[in-house]
């Protein structure tokens, strides 16, 4: 019986063929690089040759923790390193397009994070630059590489499930947005930094939608100015439909929120109130300027990262 799942296990195995291996450099030494990218690269046996962060000391600290690569004081210095073939860019969203452009102009393949660009025109111009230079520009989409998603997709490909006519994703979590001060003032937040992964997954299964309806909202008292919850329904030429509901304002049931947290406590005497406790899966996720203090990690999927995440 278990042998029957061989094709699914094969699809879930993440391997990088030797012919695809290239020395990697990284720009940005923030939370996602520290807790997800560098451990994933190490697990895959990929070589990280250099890291640059414009915040003095941060790259040194992260390189020290992971024991990999050389610290570069500037982007120019990093790009001057001949061995670098791929540059992973994981910085504050507004800084990303300019860095991606310089990386492409230096002749390197580039892996930006989502949100790739603040608007379609900027994104299109960067895609055209990459195409003109024969370079790969690949956004680090992570959720479609998560084991459960890959397994489900392979089962559909193999015809085990039949035709997919509807799909729904529901996410209810508390995200401590204040851990990313640069996210608090952006005009569009939740879809750009989180549920964009869900949209990518649904398009992987159902293709391009013909109509998309979106409603977005905020949680009373939230710190960001933009939306932190969204509901998106889409229809497809085949007649299929999808729903993505992502809500980052779910109250955690705690008697005392962690210091500095904007999470609401459970009402006094509520039967579900439990002592505040960190999710051990998220231990070690660190934020800017608080590098020695483990914190709850925000915009990433509830399941362990396959590697973008
Ligand atoms: N943390 C997550 O769970 C997560 C998940 C998915 C995607 N992302 C995305 O990845 C990117 C980085 O996220 P993060 O959580 O690591 O953010 P972060 O705020 O923890 O780190 C960003 C880092 O980039 C550095 N930086 C900013 N501008 C720079 C520049 N011009 N040159 C060099 N370094 C610069 C900062 O000093 C900081 O160390 C963002 O686009 C975010 O949306 C993060």
Image: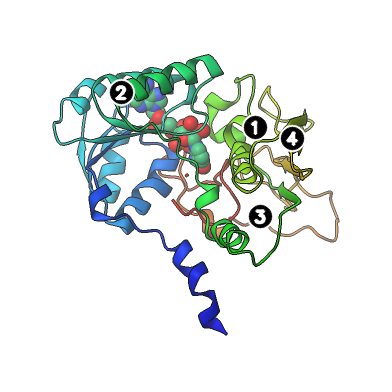
Q: Label 1: how many residues lie within 10 Å, few (<14), some (14-19) or many (20+)?
A: many
Task: Compute the Cα span from label 4 to label 1.
Answer: 7 Å
Write the residue at 45% across / 39% down: 140
**Residue position marked by numbered label 1 in the rendering:** 191
**Residue nearest the viewer, comparing 25 with 126:** 126
SS assignment at label 1: helix
Q: Which residue is the site of mark 3?
A: 276
Proximity of marks 2 and 4: CB atoms separated by less than 8 Å: no
Q: Which SS class for mark 4?
A: strand
Place of residue 133 in the rendered image (x, y in percent of width and height, measured from the top left): 29, 23
Which residue lies under the disc numbered 2?
104
SS label for mark 3: loop
Mark toward the start of the polypeptide (3 vs 4) = 4
Measure the alpha-carbon separation of dots 2 and 3: 46 Å
Disc on res. 230: 4
Q: Residue at x 40, y 59 (%)?
A: 14
In the image, is 121 to the left or to the right of 224?
left
Give the mark count: 4
Q: Position of residue 41 (x, y in %)?
A: 32, 51
Split into quadrants, the picture shows ligand 1 in the one at top left
Image x and y of residue 159, in percent? 63, 64
Crowd rating for badge 2 (residues with CA inside 10 Å; few <14, some 14–19, many 20+): many
Quadrant of the image containing the N terminus: bottom right
Do tag 4 and tag 1 residues touch (Cβ < 8 Å)?
Answer: yes
Left or right, residue 222 beside residue 143: right
| Mark 3 crowd level (few <14, some 14–19, many ≥20, 10 Å Cα) | some
From the top left corner, tell me how far across and down residue 66 is, in percent.
Answer: 28, 50
* Label located before the other in sequence (1 or 3): 1
User: Residue, x 23% and y 50% (percent of image)?
Assistant: 19
Of the image marks 2 and 3, the number of the one nearer the N terminus? 2
User: Do labels 3 and 4 touch, CB within 8 Å?
Assistant: no
Q: CA distance from mark 1 to mark 3?
A: 28 Å
């Amino acid at each position: 019986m278990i042998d029957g799942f061989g094709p699914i296990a094969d699809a879930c195995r993440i391997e990088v063929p030797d012919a695809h291996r290239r020395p990697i450099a990284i720009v940005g030494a923030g939370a996602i690089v520290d807790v997800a990218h560098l451990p994933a690269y190490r697990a895959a046996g990929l070589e990280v040759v250099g890291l640059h962060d414009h915040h003095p000391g941060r790259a040194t600290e992260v390189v020290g923790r992971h024991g990999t690569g050389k610290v570069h004081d500037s982007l120019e210095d990093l790009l001057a390193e001949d061995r670098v073939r791929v540059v992973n860019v994981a910085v504050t969203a507004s800084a990303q397009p300019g860095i991606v452009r310089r990386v492409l102009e230096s002749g390197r393949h580039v892996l930006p994070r989502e949100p790739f660009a603040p608007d379609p025109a900027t994104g299109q111009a960067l895609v055209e630059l990459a195409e003109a230079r024969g370079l790969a520009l690949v956004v680090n989409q992570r959720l479609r590489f998560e084991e459960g998603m890959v397994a489900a997709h392979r089962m559909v490909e193999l015809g085990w499930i039949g035709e997919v006519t509807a799909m729904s994703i529901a996410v209810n979590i508390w995200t401590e947005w204040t851990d990313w001060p640069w996210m608090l003032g952006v005009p569009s937040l939740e879809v750009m930094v989180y549920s964009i992964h869900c949209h990518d997954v649904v398009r992987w299964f159902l293709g391009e939608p013909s109509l998309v309806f979106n409603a977005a909202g905020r949680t009373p008292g939230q710190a960001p100015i933009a939306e932190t919850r969204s509901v998106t329904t889409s229809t497809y030429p085949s007649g299929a439909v999808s729903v993505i509901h992502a809500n980052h304002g779910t109250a955690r049931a705690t008697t005392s929120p962690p210091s500095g947290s904007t999470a609401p406590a459970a009402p006094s005497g509520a039967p579900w109130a439990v002592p505040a406790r960190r999710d051990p899966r998220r231990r070690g996720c660190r934020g800017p300027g608080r590098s020695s203090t483990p914190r709850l990690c925000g915009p990433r999927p509830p399941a362990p990262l396959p590697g973008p995440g």
